[in-house]
Image (cartoon, grey):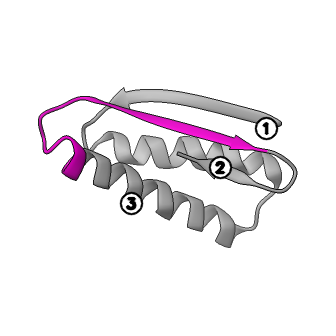
Amino acid sequence: MRNQMRIFFDAVSENEAFARLVAAGFFAQLNPTIAEITDVKTAVSEAVTNAIIHGYEGKGGTVELFCAYDENRLQIE
């Protein structure tokens, strides 16, 4: 991978917006279209929300967000 980042944050619903913006900001380095940025933000929002609601069931914990890219691929975990 050409560039990558990893963040950890508390599994609370307020951090969903934070994760969405961090991923979009990281991806912005590739000069994506508005539609592509929207797609990334939506995917991250849904994944983080699902992790918080279904993975932690309101009991707290830590969510990890990993983003990476190279010339042909964006990876988000």
The reply to whether discs 2 and 3 touch (Cβ–Cβ < 8 Å) is: no
Crowdedness near tag 2: few (<14), some (14–19) or many (≥20) residues, C-alpha within 10 Å? few
Q: Earlier in the sequence, mark 1 or mark 3?
A: 1
Examine the structure image and report whether residue 56 is included in the region drawn in magenta: yes
- The x and y percentages for residue 32 are 77, 61
Instruction: Tell me the number on the disc at residue 75.
Output: 2
Residue 39 as seen in the image, left or right of residue 17: right
Q: Which mark is residue 1?
A: 1
Q: Residue at x 53, y 58 (%)?
A: 41
**Element at label 3:** helix
User: Is there CB contact under 8 Å for labels 1 and 2?
Assistant: yes
Q: Amino acid at mark 2?
A: Gln
> Residue 25, position in %: x, y?
64, 44
Q: Which residues are magenta?
A: 53-69
Picture quarter with the N terminus:
top right
Residue on which disc 3 sits: 46
Would you say residue 55 sits in the magenta stretch? yes
Q: Position of residue 46 (x, y in %)?
A: 39, 60
